[in-house]
Amino acid sequence: MLKAGRRYQKFYLGVLTLFGAVILSLTLNACQKDSTRLESNGTPISIEETSQIIPPPSPTSQQNAASPTTTPWEAQITQEGFPPPSIDPATAVPDPLDGLTLSDEVQIWVLLGSDTEPPFNGRTPAIHLLFIHPRFSKASLVSIPANLYVYIPGYTMQRISTAYAVGGIEALRQTLAYNFGITPSRFVLAHPGDFQWLVDDLDSIEVSVFYPMPQTCGGIRAGLIQMDGALALCYASFLEDMDEVDRMRRQQQLLSIIFRKITSDGNLVKLPLLYASYQGWIETDFSLQEIMTYIPLALRLADPDRIGYFMIGSEQTTLWTIPGNSEAQVFLPNQDAVKALLQQAINDIMAPMPLSDQVQTLEAQITAAFEATINAIEALDTSQTPTLPLETQTPTWIPTFTPPSYP
């Protein structure tokens, strides 16, 4: 019985391995330099932008077929199965992206980081596409800049970070389907506090800062820096002068560091506590039963070089100023270059590669930490006061009820 219980608990820890990895992949929120302020400890505080998100169009405003006044490009959008814009776009809507070569074995998830704490819906400045090949145990993470100017079906041309705020996960899925030619089957959305809590629960992380950042987060020097949750959140979210590439690079760096730490030295024994802490905060369409099926994959993905990192950067975009008084700048995607990057990320997970001995090492570390935890629990159980025998217990009087008789 005890051995069976241990096997079950070990299995449950494996389930939570993937859950923890998903949490840490999602909770990197973003804040622009000119739209945030920092507390003295470096924690970013969101300030509402001057431009407001226009509410999503009502269902009656979305036409299923082109009307007599529909423009040619609106007709093309409708023919492709997407609703036309309800608001005049600031620039022409591009054609939908298609033609990616994608195996049925490849799974697509989207990992989102919100800039707003629940229960409010805000923008999602952190957007990461995750391509997974379960049989080959490989994955590719593609980071998307928050200021990428794309078509949100049924709405208008706008920053991709507003898609979730406009219409929830379905609006984001349609946006990704139109502009990237892929539709994620699963999503996970986390909030700023989740990432900060995770780093603190891991007792901080060590980050190699390649160049100093004196103007933000209370000042960060170059070198190996010990970061708590608040500092790591600021380091991941800071944006200066539209340098989305640098911010995405910092986010991917932290994702790699945290994933290595959470899967090494037996740290996975903390996952039951993490699961309880984050339950009710993370928004997802994953069920626990579904997560269980990914346990072997999660262990193999911890092997080095099985996760590739990509980003849509300067080679795939063009800086563009939105017409009007705001003079706001965004990134217009180059469809051919974006398609080539996505195809490269997909192709990289289609080639099998052998596992190294690292997986066995991680399993041994987890087993040792797990056995130490079980021994501590068993010692605690034996130290508890035993239940008194039946004959020494004080009897409890239980009154009986006799129903009244009626004539």
Image (cartoon, grey):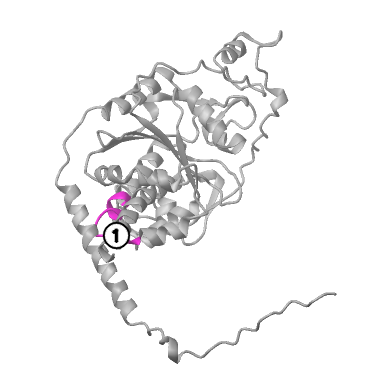
In the rendered image of this protein, does residue 165 appear above or below residue 99? Answer: below
Residue 317 at what x, y percent from top left?
A: 43, 25
Task: Determine whether 113 is above or below 351 in the image.
Answer: below
**Residue 218 seen anywhere in this rendered image of the structure:** no
Prevalent SS, magenta region: helix
Residue position marked by numbered label 1 in the rendering: 267
- Residue 217: percent from left, percent from top: 44, 55
Q: Does residue 365 belong to the magenta stretch?
A: no
Pick the quarter of the image with the N terminus.
Answer: bottom left
Q: Is residue 47 left or right of residue 100?
A: right
Position of residue 304 in the picture relative to residue 278 (left or right): left
For image coordinates 35% across by 40% down, the residue present is 249
Give amino acid for label 1.
Asn
Closer to the camera in the image, 51 or 363 = 363
Quarter occupied by residue 74: top right
Q: Is residue 388 above or below residue 314?
A: below
Q: What range of the chain is rendered magenta?
A: 258-270
Where's residue 84, x and y in %?
Answer: 62, 19
Query: What residue is drawn where x is 27% and y is 33%?
Result: 135
Outermost residue toward the left in this view: 357
Element assignment for label 1: helix
Q: Give the quarter of the image for residue 274.
A: bottom left
